[in-house]
Structures are given as structure tokens and as C-alpha cells.
Image (cartoon, rainbow, N blue to C red):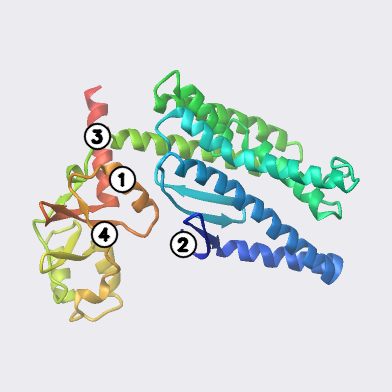
């Protein structure tokens, strides 16, 4: 994820913090400083850091459960709205998905119970004056963990409860249909939350929008997985019929596009892909560089090559990360073509259109 920095590694999982989280930290510290003075600022920052420590533990609960089923966890990123664990894939078995989904909220329950026991042993009632405005950091954390557990168990995407609902439905119907049904239920819940929010609760309106869009996104992601099933990289690869070398000039390459070539143009040197040029990229470069500029200056980092036999679904995470949008396709140890995010999109749209015509 862009604008994020690695701050630690836990159980082999890189933990990143997003730049916007630092902005939130400064905002909370500044707001408390103006309202309560230096002591209040320190208290606000400490509480926020402790809260996001609980969020990290929540995401580690999901991640460790997933790793137990052989699923690789790319990283965990802390954002102002919470944490995101990037998994290579979701569990294929619905029962496993239930366990992975419940592992996060279960961590919050354990934290809340531990805090409650700690407060009780100190002769304090763990349920008295619980809320975000009480002076006790432990009580605030207890309340926050209870809230996180309850909120994440709502039966709506992108919360864990939505995934549990989908997994339970998937034991009785196809996975894609279960996802659509769970997404519809989640969107219905979002509409109800939105209606309540219209009576003066702006926070509920934001939550409703978040839930509604999350349900849409999850349904679209699963539909994409269904569309990619059975397809290989070779099915969508662009054959290496035309290419250029890194030393060719910008002007010479622009001339090719002027005469009618509008696709992606691979830059190849000694059988290795050095990069990919597109018409929009070259037009932008023409405004900045002289015509005799070698195209090598326009190329970004090259992503690892893939095999033509690899399942196409395996590329989705790479394209979604934003770090790769074009990859070299190897066949029998030789460069055979390229595959791009845009090319995959065009292929799927054409395939969907043909299916619609057949109906």
C-alpha cells in the first residue's frame, strides 16, 4: 500500500503504518493539548497508541489463523480507520473462513476480559463508568475492545461478521451466490443504519456508507475470482509480435504510434523484458523530454516474470497492489509476451459481452 512504512515484523509478517495515521496522531495530540493541556495531550496520544496496539493484535489474530491453513500474509497496514491484513487468498473451506474471520474479534474479547479481570482485582467494577470520556485508560480500552468485537461481528461486509455469514451460507450454496446473498443482507443493514442516522447521528451515516460500499466491493471481488477460474496467464497474454530496445529514441517510438499502433509496446533487451510503453505514457513523456531521449529513461521497475501456465487469479493481488501493472510472460524459458492489468480488464469485458450475447 502506498504512503506506508514498515515499522516492525511480527511472526514473519511485515507491519506497516500509513502516513494518514501519523496525521491522526498529531490531530489527537493537538486537540487534547488545546482542550486539556500537555497532560491531556500525552494521555490522548497514549490511548490512541494503545488502541491501535489492540487493532494490530486483532489483525494478527486473523493472520495467524490464516497462516495455520497455509495462507501467506503479505503484510498488515495500520490506517486511521483500523487495520488491514493482506492475505494471498481466502480459505477455500467455508469452515476455515469462519475460524479465520472469528479469530480477530476473539482477540478483542480476550483483551476486554483481561482488562475487566485486572480492574476487578484492583477492587474496581469493570462496568462502572465505562466509556471513552472516563479518565481511566484501562476502562477506555476495555470499552473500545468490546465495541470493536461487537462492531466486527455485524453480519455485513467488510466486517468479520459478513464473512462468517458468507461462510455459513456457502456450506449450503455455491460460494459466489453465498457472497451475493451476504452482500445483499449487509446492504440492507446499511440502509437501516442510514435511516437511523438521518435522525441526527452523522456517525451512523458514515458507517452505513462504509458498510454499503464494502458489501459492493466484496461481491465484485468474488465475482472477479469466479470469472478468473480456470484461466491461465497464457490465455490473456499479449504475444510478443512487436517490441523495441531501450536505446531507441522517444521520437522514433512516437512515430510507430502515429502510424497506427495503439497497444502496449514491450521494451526488450537480450530476451529480457525491461519495461512496457503505452500511448498515454509516451504522450506525457513527449511534453517533458526531447525527441532523441532513449526510452530507457521512461521505464519504471520491472516486476518478476510469470509463467504462461500460472493461474490468472494469482496475478490479481499483484495488480491490485499498484506496484505491478505489466509482467513478462515466459514459455519454455523464453519471453513469449506480456500481461497487463488493462489487458486482463479488456479480456474479461469481451468475455462477459460474448456470454451476454449467447444468452
Q: CA distance from mark 4 to mark 3?
A: 22 Å
Taking depth in this image into account, of 289 and 116 the one nearest to the observer is 116
Q: Residue 335: horizontal and vertical position, in percent?
A: 13, 57
Give the residue pinned by disc 4: 304
State the mark number for residue 343: none
Image height of 171 relative to 283, above or below: above
- Circle 1 residue: 314
Q: Residue at x 80, y 69 (%)?
A: 33
Residue 326 lies, with reference to residue 212, above or below; the image says: below
Badge 2: how crowded within 10 Å, few (<14), some, or many (20+)? few
- How far is mark 3 from mark 1, CA to CA? 11 Å
The reply, left or right, for residue 261 in relation to residue 71 is left
Of callouts 4 and 3, which one flags the residue occurring earlier in the amino acid sequence?
3
Q: Residue 2 got which mark?
A: 2
The first of marks 3 and 2 along the sequence is 2
Circle 3 residue: 230
Residue under the image location 60 percent in, 52 percent down: 56
Q: Helix, strand or loop at disc 1? A: helix
Q: Are marks 1 and 2 in contact (CB under 8 Å)?
A: no
Circle 1 crowding by C-alpha within 10 Å: few under 14, some 14–19, many from 20: some
Q: Whole-Å distance between the Cαs marked 4 and 1?
A: 13 Å
Label located before the other in sequence (3 or 1): 3
Amino acid at each position: 500500500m502506498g504512503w506506508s512504512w514498515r515499522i516492525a515484523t511480527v511472526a514473519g509478517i511485515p507491519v506497516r503504518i500509513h502516513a494518514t495515521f501519523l496525521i491522526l496522531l498529531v490531530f489527537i495530540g493537538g486537540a487534547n493539548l488545546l482542550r486539556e493541556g500537555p497532560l491531556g495531550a500525552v494521555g490522548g496520544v497514549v490511548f490512541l497508541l494503545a488502541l491501535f496496539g489492540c487493532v494490530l493484535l486483532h489483525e494478527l489474530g486473523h493472520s495467524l489463523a490464516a497462516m495455520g491453513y497455509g495462507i501467506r500474509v503479505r503484510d498488515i497496514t495500520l490506517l486511521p480507520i483500523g487495520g488491514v491484513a493482506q492475505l494471498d487468498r481466502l480459505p477455500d473451506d467455508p469452515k476455515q473462513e469462519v475460524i479465520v474471520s472469528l479469530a480477530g474479534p476473539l482477540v478483542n474479547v480476550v483483551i476486554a476480559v483481561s482488562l475487566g479481570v485486572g480492574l476487578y482485582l484492583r477492587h474496581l467494577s469493570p462496568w462502572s463508568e465505562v466509556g471513552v470520556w472516563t479518565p481511566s485508560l484501562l476502562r477506555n480500552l476495555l470499552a473500545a475492545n468490546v465495541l470493536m468485537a461487537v462492531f466486527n461481528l455485524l453480519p455485513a461486509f467488510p466486517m468479520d461478521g459478513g464473512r462468517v455469514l458468507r461462510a455459513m451460507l456457502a456450506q449450503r450454496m455455491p460460494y459466489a451466490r453465498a457472497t451475493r446473498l451476504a452482500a445483499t443482507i449487509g446492504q440492507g443493514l446499511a440502509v437501516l443504519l442510514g435511516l437511523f442516522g438521518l435522525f441526527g447521528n452523522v456517525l451512523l451515516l458514515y458507517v452505513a456508507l462504509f458498510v454499503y460500499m464494502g458489501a459492493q466491493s466484496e461481491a465484485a471481488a468474488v465475482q472477479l475470482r469466479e470469472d478468473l477460474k480456470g484461466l491461465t496467464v497464457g490465455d490473456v497474454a499479449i504475444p510478443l509480435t512487436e517490441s523495441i530496445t531501450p536505446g531507441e529514441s522517444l521520437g522514433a517510438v512516437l512515430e510507430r504510434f502515429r502510424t497506427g499502433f495503439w497497444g502496449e509496446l514491450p521494451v526488450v533487451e537480450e530476451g529480457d523484458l525491461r519495461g512496457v510503453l503505452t500511448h498515454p505514457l509516451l504522450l506525457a513523456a513527449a511534453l517533458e523530454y526531447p525527441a532523441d531521449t532513449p526510452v530507457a529513461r521512461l521505464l519504471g521497475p520491472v516486476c518478476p516474470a510469470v509463467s504462461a501456465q500460472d493461474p490468472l487469479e494469482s496475478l490479481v493481488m499483484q495488480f491490485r497492489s499498484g506496484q505491478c501493472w505489466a509482467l513478462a510472460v515466459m514459455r519454455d524459458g523464453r519471453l513469449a509476451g506480456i500481461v497487463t492489468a488493462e489487458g486482463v480488464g479488456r479480456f474479461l469485458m469481451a468475455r462477459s459481452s460474448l456470454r451476454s450475447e449467447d444468452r
